[in-house]
Structures are given as C-alpha cells and as structure tokens.
Image (tube, rainbow, N blue to C red):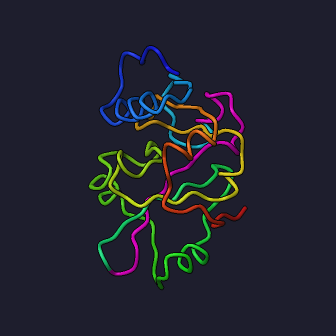
Amino acid sequence: MQSSHPPIVSTTTERIMSLLDSAGVPYRCIEHPVVRTSEEAARVRGTPLEIGGKSLLFKIGKKSDFCLFVVSAALRTDNRPMRRFLGVQKLRFARREELLSHTGLEPGCVPPFGAPIFDLPLYVDERLAAGEEIAFTAADHRMSIRMKMADYLTVANPTGVFAFSRA
C-alpha cells in the first residue's frame, strides 16, 4: 500500500490514491517528466507498452451518453464489437471539450476509472484484463500508478470486460 503521496498531485489523483488506499490494495506511484503519449509513458515508467491502460472516452449514439473504454496502450479499439456490446449504431471518440466537461482532464491523462472517480460506465478490454499488471497515467501527465491487474479490476469494478481491441 502507498504510504506517502507525492507532494504535487491533482484532486483526481488524490481521489484515486484514496480509493486504492481505502481498498487496501498495493500500488506504486511513479513521478516522471511530462508525457504526452503511451510510448513516452511506458519508457519513463520502465514498463512494457502492453501493460499501459489507455482510457478513451466515447460518445454513444445520438444521445448525450458517454462511456470510458480502457485498452492496452499497445493496441487500438475496434468499434464493431463496442457498438455490438452496447447495442448502438453510432459510437465516436469524445471531442476535447467533451472530455474536459466529463473528466476535467486533458487527453492523455485520464485514469481508467468509472464511479466513484468519474460518473461514467467503464469497459475494459479482455486482452488488457488478462494481464498481470496495469500501469496508467493518474490524472496528471507527470504521475502514473502501477498495480496488479486483479486489484485494479476489483477496485475499478468495470461495467463490462469484453474483447474490443485490435493490433
């Protein structure tokens, strides 16, 4: 379990660490230089790209509903299984202003959590979920968290885990 938090963290980062601490799960907080891509994040963390959890906000159909999908940083999303799973015809990436409105964050630093961090349904790709670990940017381009996948899945409690990635 993390015993001391880094000196400069965002409110969302604090909420994530508080959630993990209250669940009693071990995790490692990694402070690093600003990163803008998954490849940069993996390099500064010293982790394989495959364990990086990339969080992507999508708009569902014509409604004003949004959901968060988490995929390995080494893979891409495939809209077909995502639309099929959700039972919708249209699904698109959220625009920057929509992302800011729903998370308060910039692209590239959205952590892979729905409630209680974000009021959003959370879906995790089964290829990522099958791994031993996950590493993700923790609501700040200078902060990452690395933890066991089983602990992440328990705490994050995704709405669904299914296959929606492609190379």
In percent of the image, x 45 and y 66: which residue is there?
93
Q: Nearer the viewer, residue 118 or 47?
A: 118
- The residue located at (50%, 25%) in the rendering is 33
Give the quadrant of the C terminus.
bottom right
Is residue 75 shown left or right of residue 11? right
Q: Is residue 13 above or below residue 109?
A: above
Q: Is residue 159 above or below residue 82?
A: above
Left or right? Give the position of 4 relative to 167: left
Q: How many marks?
A: 0
Q: Which residues are magenta?
A: 41-62
Q: Does the segment drawn in magenta span residue 52?
A: yes
Residue at 62% in and 65% down: 162
Residue 23 place in picture, x, y as percent: 46, 33
**Quarter assignment of residue 64:** bottom left
Outermost left residue = 101
Residue at the farthest bottom position: 89
Horizontal and vertical percent position of residue 160: 54, 63
Q: Residue at the location (42% across, 63% down)?
A: 67
